[in-house]
């Protein structure tokens, strides 16, 4: 069976205030499913992606030292309409 593992980074940061151990999460899912995860992705959007480069690099380490996720980071863009600032995904 092919198993895909997709993480919405913004949602994880909003729901879990503490750090999440993605390696343990992956291992738990593999144990519960009785199979290995074939593809894992971590999606996030940031106004300054290079600032979080250490986290993004750590997420790409392959098992058993890391979760082995493919990291997809998208830039946020600021739009100014009068006095309000709207931040939209590209």
Image: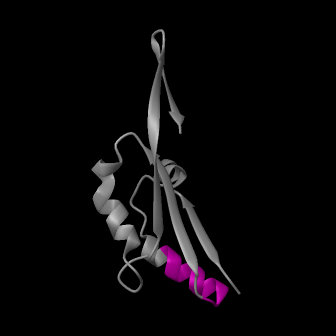
In the foreground, 8 or 74: 74
Above or below, 86 against 54 in this view is above
Judge left or right: residue 2 versus residue 18. Answer: right
Residue located farthest toward the right when viewing the structure as drawn = 1
Q: Residue furthest front?
A: 90
Residue 68 horizontal/vertical position (percent): 44, 76
Quadrant of res 75: top left
Between 27 and 49, the residue placed more toward the observer is 49
**The residue stretch that appears in magenta:** 25-35
| Image side of residue 30 versus residue 14, left or right | right
* Quarter of image, res 33: bottom right
Q: Residue furthest top?
A: 82
Residue 3 in picture, x, y percent from top left: 65, 79
Figure check: 54 above or below 5: above
Residue 20 on image: x %, y %: 43, 64
Relative side of 2 to 22, left or right = right
Residue 40, quarter of the rendered image: bottom right
The percent coordinates of residue 32 (x first, y second) are: 63, 84
Q: Residue at x 50, y 47 (%)?
A: 14
The overriding secondary structure of the stretch rendered in magenta is: helix
Q: Residue at x 40, y 81 (%)?
A: 62
Image quadrant holding the N terminus, namely: bottom right
| Residue 77 counted in the magenta span | no
Residue at 50%, 62% (x, y): give it: 42
**Which is nearer the eye, 36 or 78?**
78
């Amino acid at each position: 069976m092919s198993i895909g593992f997709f993480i919405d980074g913004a949602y994880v940061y909003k729901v879990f205030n503490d750090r999440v151990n993605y390696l343990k999460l992956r291992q738990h899912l593999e144990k519960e499913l009785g199979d290995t995860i074939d593809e894992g992705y971590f999606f996030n959007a940031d106004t300054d992606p290079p600032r979080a480069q250490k986290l993004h690099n750590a997420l790409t380490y392959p098992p058993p030292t890391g979760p082995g996720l493919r990291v997809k980071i998208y830039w946020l863009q600021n739009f100014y309409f009068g006095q309000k600032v709207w931040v939209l995904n590209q």
